[in-house]
Image: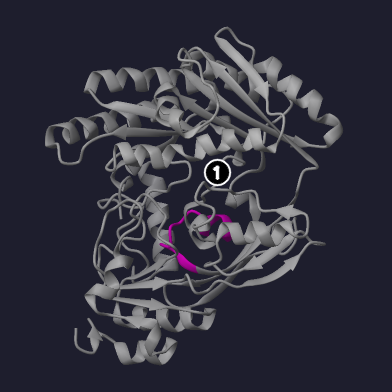
Amino acid sequence: MGGHVRHVDLDRLRDIVGADQVCYEAADCWPYGYDNSKLHALPEAVVFAIDHEQVVAITRLCYDARIPLIARGRGTGTTGATVPTAGGIVLSLERMNRIVEVDAGNRYIVCEPGVTNQEIQDAAGRTGFFWPPDPTSAAFCSIGGNLAYNSAGPRAVKYGTPRENTLGLRAVTGNGETIRTGVYTTKGVVGYDLTRLLIGSEGTLATITEATLRLTPKAEAVATIEALFRDIESAAEAVARIMAQPITPCALEFMDKSAIDMVRHHTEIEIPAEAGALLIIEVDGPASLMEEACRAISDAASVDGLLRIKTATDRREAGRLWHMRKALSPALRTVAPGKINEDVVVPVSRIPELIARLEALGKRFGIRIVNFGHAGNGNIHVNLLVNPNDAAEMKRAHECLDAVFETVLTLRGTLSGEHGVGLVKKEYVGRELDRESLAIMRDIKARFDPHNILNPGKMFPTEAM
């Protein structure tokens, strides 16, 4: 590449961040060309920023030269949203990893995007608080990535997603301008809500350099309940009944029979062979109310088809349940490294119909489908276990996936709950969003990013943008 990346002088990049913060040799850039989707494209350079001012300077450089700029955290996303398909520069934010301020009195924490979710939980926990979004990859994923995808996790059923738990942001637009969105208070209605607009935008509107996260006090007590059912339909009915009564669980996780079979050897819990579905239910609140809350949840879950329901007696027993749930994704990747993993959402009351239709689609297309996920808000992870080297199977799988998405939209659902859109779903987006909405979004993109340098080619159908 000599001394240039297209029209950007590498010497100028080095002047901004330092010589040891710029990579341009193919071998050094290669790891930054993919995420957990396994899709890959080689960037022309990788730049590591360590503060806001560097992000501003890098963005202005790319703006002037019309060079694509793809902000990246730790690459745990599954939709190809950080894959540099247009070439250009990957802006790694992993070294912007400071926790700037913890203000327990005002219930917020300020941090840079490279801080991991777990580091936020640890810092907040020392003051008796937590940040509700808790993806399974919390130990590895960055806050910047959580915000880019609006990634949540099990606790979203009670506490919401990053959009509900972020007070404000500092960010850099596509022409290098700095904006501050939101507030430091729990109330505020001045201007449009740009904070919620940027969260979930996958780095296409601005690069987030600082976030003010809303903290929640830790509950005094937590109880974990295991409920086993004869079939999927009865478990789905139980979910709908649980969500229709006053006690809102802080987590309500679902596993179908195929998922249970996948993790039997990963758990000490005895699961009867006739079990067709499992719910892991967690409730939190004052210790004095735990017994009553568990009884209310158990009563709601007592449908025809319930095999057993049991409250964990201690942390160890609860830990075994959650270990089984968290072991599922690695187990699936071992069995089918090329699996197709989608995270669709339907209204909770439509879960039984969704699951029934997914079973029918699996039989129709000859594809093994494993379902699990955050049943409390209808967010089901649909896993198609396929062999990428089998062309005929992959053809059937994509036809099946097309039918899955059509089914979800028919049930008034949405195509993604927390994994985002990125590359893998963008051509389906036009089925969910009307032309007028897409046109408005295109105009918003143009205002934030006049030269279309920020993560181009993501989120929206190519034709629409």
169 to 241, vertically: above or below: below
Residue 207 horizontal side relative to residue 390, left or right: right
The magenta stretch spans residue 430: no
Q: Tell me where residue 353 sits by quadrant.
A: top left
Q: Position of residue 39 (x, y in %)?
A: 27, 54
Q: Residue tagged by mark 1?
A: 153
Residue 346 horizontal side relative to residue 365, left or right: right
Can see residue 206?
yes
**Quadrant containing the N terminus in the rendered view:** bottom left
Toward the viewer: 455 or 324?
324
* Count of picture labels: 1
Residue at screen point 49% across, 57% down: 141
84 to 358, vertically: above or below: below
Residue at screen point 78% across, 54% down: 128
Toward the viewer: 268 or 175?
268
Q: Position of residue 376 (x, y in %)?
A: 58, 30
Residue at screen point 46% across, 17% down: 276
Can see residue 433?
no
Specify start and end residues of the magenta stretch as a single range. Answer: 193-207
Q: Position of residue 344 (x, y in %)?
A: 43, 35
Question: Badge 1, how many Cα within 10 Å: few under 14, some, many 20+?
Answer: many
Which residue appears farthest toward the right when viewing the image? 288
Toward the viewer: 308 or 351?
308
316 to 347, vertically: above or below: below
The magenta stretch spans residue 205: yes
Toward the viewer: 314 or 249?
314
Residue 210 horizontal side relative to residue 275, left or right: right
Residue at screen point 71% across, 55% down: 215
Which residue appears farthest toward the top when viewing the image? 304
**Quadrant containing the C terminus in the rendered view:** bottom left
Amino acid marked by disc 1? Gly
Q: How is the image coloured?
A: one colour
